[in-house]
Amino acid sequence: MKRFYLITMLLCLCAIGAQAQTQDRPFTNGPVWRITYYKIKPGKGTEYIKYIREHSVPIYDEEKRQGLILDYKYFSQPTNDGTSDWDIAFGVSFSNYAAALDYDAEKSKKAMEISLKHHGSAEARTKAIEQRNQMRDMVASQLIREEKANPIK
């Protein structure tokens, strides 16, 4: 009987210690973002923004509505560190790293269907993608995790 109480007491102490460690975590993990940085080619800024508004926004809005992504955002940089620095960054958020890295065949197929429906045909989609790629160059792409600072207790 003493052994039972001893084991129970040890388990309780371990549980209290584990709870304390969880409460003392400095951050709570948030969604994972794929951020891609682009350099807009000279003279193509207005045309590229028009492309985003006409094509990218409706497609990503539908992907968000269907639960393929959590959210998306565009970021601009009014200053830069030189001619090879980025102008516009695009971020897509996923619930976790697995969702960001394992964009499985089913989700990819749904995203392609959304894109095809928006453009009307595979040829029109290919032409639009070629047009987009003539307006920008990719500078970098990174996976980052959003973190929320927990209050000090």
Image: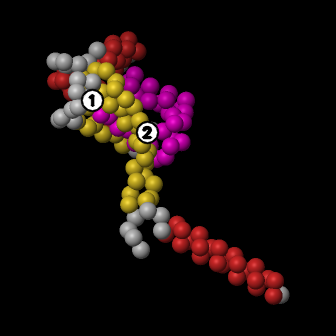
Q: Position of residue 123 (x, y in %)?
A: 38, 11
Q: Give the range drawn in magenta.
A: 89-118
Any mark on residue 95, and which? none
Q: In the visual, does 116 lie left or right of 99?
A: left
Residue occupying the point 16% across, 24% down:
46
Q: What's the amino acid at mark 2?
A: Leu
Q: Residues within 10 Å of mark 1 (few under 14, many from 20)?
A: many
Residue at image position (18%, 24%) is 45
On the rendered structure, is 56 left or right of 26?
Answer: left
Q: Specify few, some or many for label 2: CA neighbours under 10 Å numbering under 14, 14-19, or 20 or more.
A: some
Quadrant for residue 21, please give it: bottom right
In the picture as drawn, the residue positioned furthest to the front comes out as 81
In which image quadrant can residue 148 be found?
bottom left
Q: Is residue 99 highlighted in magenta?
A: yes
Determine which residue is flagged by label 1.
Answer: 86
Sequence-wise, the earlier of marks 2 and 1 is 1
